[in-house]
Image: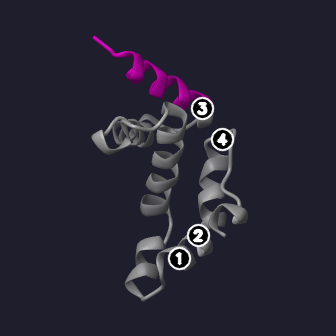
């Protein structure tokens, strides 16, 4: 049985990244449904989960952090890579440089 929140998260996921493969959308869905996201509206939980998943899976963010870059600087340097993946998935929203100021 699916809950109202599970249905809302799935709907948001489909709206935001309609062409994401299941192998990517499933961990994003799970993250959006995790306990620490429960207090957020589904749309925000899904968006944060999408961006974090792409950042850690498809960019060199972790390597930048390992090299000593602070979190904000590392995030700034991977914005284009995140948006490239979002474009591939036909996203309806993108990360902007203003998001990181």
In three-dimensional space, the C-alpha distance between marks 2 and 1, rounded to whole angstroms, equals: 7 Å
Which residue matches tag 4?
91
In three-dimensional space, the C-alpha distance between marks 3 and 1, rounded to whole angstroms, equals: 27 Å
In three-dimensional space, the C-alpha distance between marks 3 and 2, rounded to whole angstroms, equals: 22 Å
Front residue (pair 38, 69): 38
Question: In which quarter of the view is residue 31 placed?
Answer: top left
Residue at coordinates 53% horizontally, 76% vertically from top-left? 74
**Horizontal and vertical percent position of residue 72:** 54, 74
In three-dimensional space, the C-alpha distance between marks 4 and 3, rounded to whole angstroms, equals: 7 Å
Which residue matches tag 2?
78
Task: Tell whether label 1 touches label 2 (CB within 8 Å).
Answer: yes
Task: Tell whether label 2 touches label 3 (CB within 8 Å).
Answer: no
Residue at coordinates 48% horizontally, 75% vertically from top-left? 71
Which residue matches tag 3?
18
Question: In which quarter of the view is residue 22 placed?
Answer: top left
| Name of the residue lying farthest toward the top | 1
Residue range (magenta):
1-15
Query: Quick one: label 1 or label 4, which is nearer the N terminus?
Result: 1
Q: Magenta stretch: residue 81 in it? A: no
Task: Tell whether label 4 touches label 2 (CB within 8 Å).
Answer: no
Residue at coordinates 41% horizontally, 42% vertically from top-left? 28
| Mark 2 element type | loop
**Mark 1 packing: few (<14 Cα in 10 Å), some, or many (20+)?**
many
- Label of residue 74 in the image: 1
Q: Quadrant of the C terminus?
A: bottom right
| Mark 1 element type | helix
Identify whether 80 is placed above or below 70. above
* Secondary structure mainly formed by the magenta segment: helix
Task: Tell whether label 1 touches label 3 (CB within 8 Å).
Answer: no
């Amino acid at each position: 049985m699916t809950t109202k929140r599970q249905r809302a998260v799935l709907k948001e996921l489909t709206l935001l990244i309609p062409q994401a493969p299941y192998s990517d959308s499933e961990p994003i869905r799970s993250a959006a449904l995790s306990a620490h996201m429960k207090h957020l509206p589904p749309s925000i939980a899904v968006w944060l989960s999408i961006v974090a998943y792409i950042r850690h899976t498809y960019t060199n963010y972790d390597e930048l952090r390992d090299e000593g870059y602070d979190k904000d600087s590392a995030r700034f340097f991977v914005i284009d890579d995140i948006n490239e993946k979002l474009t591939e998935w036909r996203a309806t929203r993108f990360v902007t440089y203003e998001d990181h100021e």
